Amino acid sequence: MEFQLASMWEALADAGPEHVCLVAGEVCHTRADLEGRANRLAHHLQASGVSAGDRVGVYTHNRAEHVEALLACWKLSAVPINVNYRYVAAELRHVWADAQLVAMIAEACFVPVLNELAPEFPATTTYVLISDGTNAAPSFEALSYEAALADQPQTRNFGTSRSADDLYVLYTGGTTGLPKGVMWRHVDIFFAAMGGGNYLEPISEPEQIIVNATAPPMPMTMVATAPLMHAAGQWVTMISLFTGGKAIVYCDRPFDAATLLDLADAEGAQTMSLIGDAMALPLIAEQRRDPRELPNLFAVSNGGAMISPATREQLAEVFPGKILSDGFGSSETGTVGTGANSSVDEGGSFFNVRPGTEVLDPETLEPVAVGEPGILAGTGRIPIGYLNQPEATAKTFRTDANGDRWVMSGDWAIRGEDGRVQLLGRGSATINSGGEKIHPEEVEAACRTHPAVHDVLVTSVPDERWGARVVAIVETASDLTLEELQVHCREHIAGYKVPRDLVFAKIEHTAVGKPDVVWARAHACATLGADTPISPPSL
């Protein structure tokens, strides 16, 4: 057996089939249940022509079928492609073409956008639709998910040759607008982001995963609130599965704090993950309204967006004695570090980082001195690069004078005397709102297609709940309302990218003629009465 994700999962399932491993909405799967359904889906995909290396779109909200689809693809050495369900047609078109999808597994509610795009992609010949109560009729040939499984065997016998080098691809909005596919080997993503079979001391041989079937050293019962179409949702879920625990996937829409707390209580969750203040604040309010004891919960973790110091202090009040843990990482780096403490003094911006992580000078790729700012970078188990993006790969994945290959995170940081790393922020203008990364230039391009917009510069201001919110500073020669601009932008970009505030001003430029992003942020904050955030060093 190799460090291949499906092979290790199958070893777990065979050794402990009756263990309840996945709770997603009303669905409760033992390993045998999940294994059987994943095998049936894999057989259907294989019979439809999907083979090793082929890319399969997975286009769903959080639900058990999403996890089944991941396992089914890995069984065939095929590559599941995460499709952001917030995409509008133009964004989905880019991912569809870039990944060269041969199959699509989608929730039925997405049929309208699939109807629009499917004629453009004749190479996508297999569609499997998950029933969700919607009734839009597909204009393409499709089979329902349950029908696809119905006539297929639960056994394996796929005849594929799996490898630890099989590809795992995760599309990320990143910092350059259009999504990019980050390519990992199975063995590298397993250790860099999926817990390595033992969250405290990773396994050294793939066969050791079998211990987790009946006597796991640290079984993790974790609530994954992040979308499965994002890295955080997938990784929390897989950490739970591979450490022999139980993955609890939060499926309700929209987010409801009472439902999350009740779910954590009912399932005996040990950890509960959040995404910044957007989730933490309503959770605090609900816990104050109706306190839950949560006797099994020992940690409240956070990732994807920072929790403010004030919110962190309130979390400590409503969850006394619990560890408040911040995780830091990205699709390109895996899980880089954690910060866990009961004190609120440091605000969660200090992290213990995994081996192979350094703070480097972006020019020389040499480690900077303690206390000096540099770019956080990682070596060792890192991605191969970006799918179909050699220039972006060369920029992000760099080799130093010693021949060591580094992934440059783009985050400025300082290493302290105690070895911990303090994050300073992005060197780019990327906006992180509620855990979603938003590229200003993409929003600006959408705004410029409105006939009333003469010029535009997109920035952000601090937001109590979302961490940051998008602001469009617009030069216009005619009347324009925020609502009009929002309606127009939603035709071109996902809703979470649409400006939440509109400021009218003449765009200022730097001495070399570039739009002045420092002025933009300060002007937006002053106009809207928000505190100006501290800018990180610029490249």
Image (tube, rainbow, N blue to C red):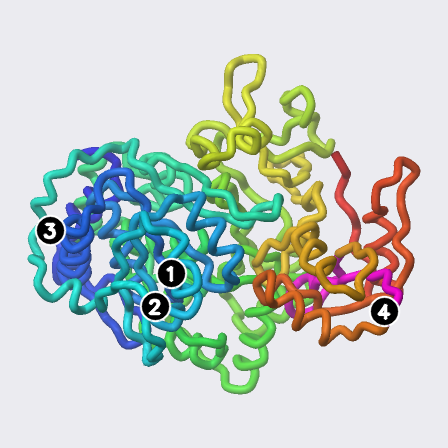
Percent from the top left, x then y, of residue 206?
22, 36
Q: Earlier in the sequence, mark 3 or mark 2?
A: 3
- Is-magenta flag for residue 464? yes
Disc 2 element: strand
- The answer to whether residue 8 shows anywhere in this view is no
Image location (x, y in percent) of residue 127: 28, 59
Residue 107 is tagged as 2
User: What's the mark number on residue 529?
Assistant: 4
Q: Residue 410: x percent and y percent? A: 63, 38
Callout in the foreground (2, 4): 2
Residue to which mark 1 is pinned: 59
Q: Estimate the spatial distance between the alpha carbons at disc 3 and disc 2, rounded to whole Å.
A: 30 Å
* Residue 333 located left or right of residue 532: left
Mark sitting earlier along the chain (3/1): 3
Q: Which residue is mark 3?
A: 14
Q: Which numbered disc, 2 or 4, marks the residue that appears first in the sequence?
A: 2
